[in-house]
Amino acid sequence: MGEPNFVKTICGYCGTGCGLVLEVQDNKIMKIRGDKEAPVNKGQTCVKGAFAYEYVHAKNRLSSPLIKKAGKLVEATWDEAYRFIADNLSAIKTNWGSNAISMFACARSTNESNYITQKFMRTVINSNNIDGCNRT
Ligand code: SF4
């Protein structure tokens, strides 16, 4: 086994945004602890941030986008997936107007991701139809 690397990151489980330090060995997460230098959590984490990381290496985890074609989900490239989303959102906006589109943001995303999500909805889609459980 190689030497462990210690990688600082932000927990993605909720909007609190705790700082974490991942112990990574041979490209695999071996352990997670709270980042003592992170102002949000000062080294503390809840049980999810510290222990719920086995999904990262799960064999059945999706590793590419899927697009439904003729009733079946088919693997696609990221370019195809983004084009598919853009084409369909544009078509809805053209045919039904901006208010026909809404977005539900994710409490498990970072504050930065949620900020970009609302910015996208308000400036690109031109709709205020955005909500999420993270506003409570
Ligand atoms: S899930 Fe837990 S560790 Fe992760 S950001 Fe939220 S409170 Fe912090």
Image: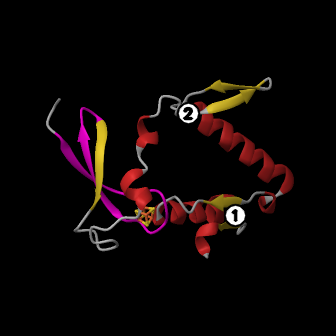
Q: Is residue 13 magenta?
A: yes
Which numbered circle lies on residue 126? 1
Say whether residue 41 is left or right of residue 12: left
Does the image show residue 40?
yes
Say which element carries label 1. Answer: loop
Q: Nearer the viewer, residue 86 or 31?
A: 31
In the image, is residue 15 above or below residue 13?
below
Does the image show residue 11?
no
Say whether residue 107 is left or right of residue 53: right
**Mark 2 neighbour class, 10 Å CA radius: few under 14, some 14 to 19, many 20 or more:** few
Q: Amino acid at mark 2?
A: Asp
Q: Is residue 39 magenta?
A: no
Q: Which residues are magenta?
A: 4-27
Which percent across, then down, holds residue 130?
68, 66
Which percent across, then down, holds residue 117?
57, 60
Q: Amino acid at mark 1?
A: Asn
Location of residue 114 by image quarter: bottom right
In the image, is residue 81 above or below residue 9?
above
Q: Nearer the viewer, residue 103 or 10?
A: 10
In the image, is residue 89 above or below residue 136?
above
Which residue position holds label 2?
79
Extreme residue toward the bottom, this view: 136
Location of residue 103 by image quarter: bottom right
Say whether residue 27 is left or right of residue 71: left
Image-quarter location of ligand 1: bottom left
Where does the N terminus fall, quadrant-wise? top left
Extreme residue toward the right, this view: 96
**Mark 1 neighbour class, 10 Å CA radius: few under 14, some 14 to 19, many 20 or more:** some
* Residue in the picture at 53% in, 30% down: 60
Between the C-alphas of marks 2 and 1, the distance is: 24 Å
Which percent across, then down, holds residue 26?
24, 32
* Residue in the picture at 70% in, 69% down: 128
